[in-house]
Image (tube, helix red, strand yellow):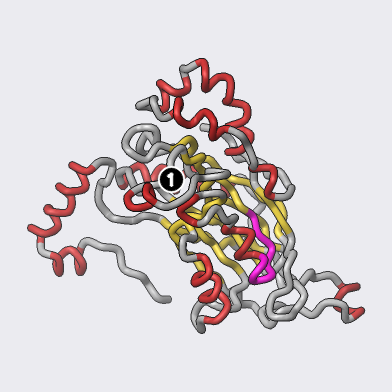
Amino acid sequence: MDTAVAPQRSWMNVLEHDLNRYFPELLRFESTPEMEASELYQRIRPEVERILNTIVLSEPSAVADGLAPFEFNSSNVASGKLQPPATAGGSDLVSALAWNIERGIQLDGIIDALRTHPQLKDKDLLLLTELDYGMARSANRFVAKEIADALGMYYAFAPVYIALQKGSGVEEFVEGENTNSSHGLAMFSRYPMKNVHAIPLPNGKDKMWGKEKRIGRLRALVADIERPAGEFRAVTVHLDAHCSRAHRRLQMKLILDHLETLPPLPTILGGDWNTTTFNSQNATRAIMGYWRRVFMGPKNVARNHLPHAAFL
């Protein structure tokens, strides 16, 4: 298993590439092992790994709602140059939101919700999954950067896939072509982030097999958040949908085992865990699992076989 990947602190152009010209040839491969054994992949492998091992970090660059982004340090606060947001300060509480925004296709609506919805706005921490950069289905926008700029937050974006096609389902028929062809997950914070890195996770399904072909694998994104009232750690997680429960357990174990190797900090872990509670490694297993629960009785399954939240 690969070790955690350190970030490359830079602007988004670190993710720019010219690999798209090789996509027609790469699409001919029916499996990742077949692709990786090819002469073509050996030539482009350094560039592929450079992109997939990069984490883009940026400080707030835009003014949100007329307020300058908050950078906590004593000189700034004392001078009155910067005012902390309403959520900053000595509170013991951290407000966090985990959301799979489904590529960021409805980006303007997502940003509006994060700015105005009473249950979504003014969060200290956003753990977001499924964000595009340079995909035709999301108008070739850099979703993470636009969210960070609109909210005035620090952000980290980790690509997980280089998409060889426009996407799945109706995404295949959207107008235009992919530019950067990247898809990943991100973290947004009101406070500075440090020690940002990613934990590679094994795929539950070969991403080069099937209709939607991609190079890469899921990752968990980790950062230490320098909050004035006390430092804490945050983790954005996206577990595999097309796998068994045992495989998702393995992915989570890899994340937790890695966190045990880090200096202890209070930790917030959230994201899309894809906890379907049955084996979805392929269509046959998913269908069999579904009908098994139908025959068991939906109410019986919901009451006696699904996990329930515990409030302490």
Seen at 53% across and 40% down, the residue is: 200
User: In the image, residue 292 lies at what x, y percent?
Assistant: 12, 53
Query: Percent x, y for residue 180?
Result: 57, 44
Residue 199 visible to an observer of this rendering: yes
Q: Is residue 89 visible?
A: no
Give the left or right position of residue 275, taking residue 187 as reference.
left
Q: Residue shown at 49%/72% (left/top)?
A: 109
The boundaries of the magenta stretch are 149-156
What is the secondary structure assignment of the residue under circle 1?
loop
Which residue extends farthest front? 175
Task: Identify the residue at image location x=32%, y=50%.
Answer: 169
Give the labeled residue for mark 1.
166
Q: Please state the horizontal and vertical placement of residue 79, each as a whole percent of the image.
A: 92, 79
Residue 53 on the magenta span: no
38 vs 169, nearest the viewer: 169
Q: Quadrant of the C terminus?
A: bottom left
